[in-house]
Image: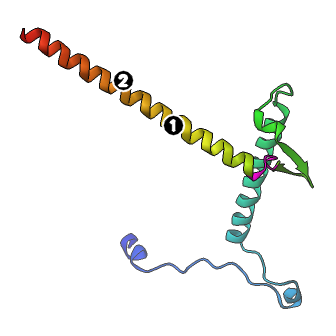
């Protein structure tokens, strides 16, 4: 007899609907809706608590270089614009490229000198 009970499918659980006189208030919140809303609310609350704790433990003497370039505007941080004009930026870029070329030439000279020494050593070893 026990096996027969399991063979017949059970009726699906249904929560009650919204009564007619309360229909103007909208849909009745079911347990799954409440659960989803509660999880979302508590997740946001936990995140806010973490941020509050982080702010409370913040070191007021702490300084980062970017702090000097940023300003608070309407409650939001904005990075200050670069005050150099376009000519100065072009000059800086040409300086950078000239430094790279200089480094490359120095490395090539070192490679040439090392090859010359290797050939010299081969000649001395051969003699």
Q: Residue at x 29, y 20 (%)?
A: 114
On the rendered structure, is 34 left or right of 80?
Answer: left
Please report the residue visible at 19 percent of the width from the left and 15 percent of the height from the top: 120
Query: Which quarter shows the C terminus?
Result: top left
Residue 83, magenta (yes or no): yes
Q: Quadrant of residue 105?
A: top left
Residue at 88% across, 46% down = 71
Task: Name the quadrant containing residue 93.
Answer: top right
Kind of element beneath mark 1: helix
What is the secondary structure assignment of the residue under circle 2?
helix
Is residue 76 in the magenta section? Answer: no
| Residue at mark 2 | 110
Q: Is residue 47 above or below residue 22?
A: above
Disc with the residue nearer the chain's start (2 vs 1):
1
Query: Which numbered marker is on residue 100?
Result: 1
Residues in magenta? 81-86
**Main structural element of the magenta stretch: helix, strand or loop?**
loop
Give the image location of residue 16, x and y in percent: 72, 81
């Amino acid at each position: 007899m026990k096996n027969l009970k399991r063979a017949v499918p059970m009726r699906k659980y249904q929560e009650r609907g919204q009564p007619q006189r309360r229909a103007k208030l909208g849909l009745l919140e079911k347990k799954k809706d409440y659960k989803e809303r509660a999880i979302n609310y508590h997740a946001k609350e936990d995140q806010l608590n973490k941020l509050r704790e982080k702010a409370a433990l913040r070191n007021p003497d702490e300084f980062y270089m970017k702090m000097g370039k940023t300003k608070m505007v309407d409650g939001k941080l904005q990075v200050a614009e670069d005050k150099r004009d376009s000519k100065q930026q072009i000059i800086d870029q040409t300086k950078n490229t000239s430094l790279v070329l200089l480094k490359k030439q120095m490395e090539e000279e070192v490679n040439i000198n090392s090859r010359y020494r290797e050939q010299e050593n081969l000649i001395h070893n051969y003699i």
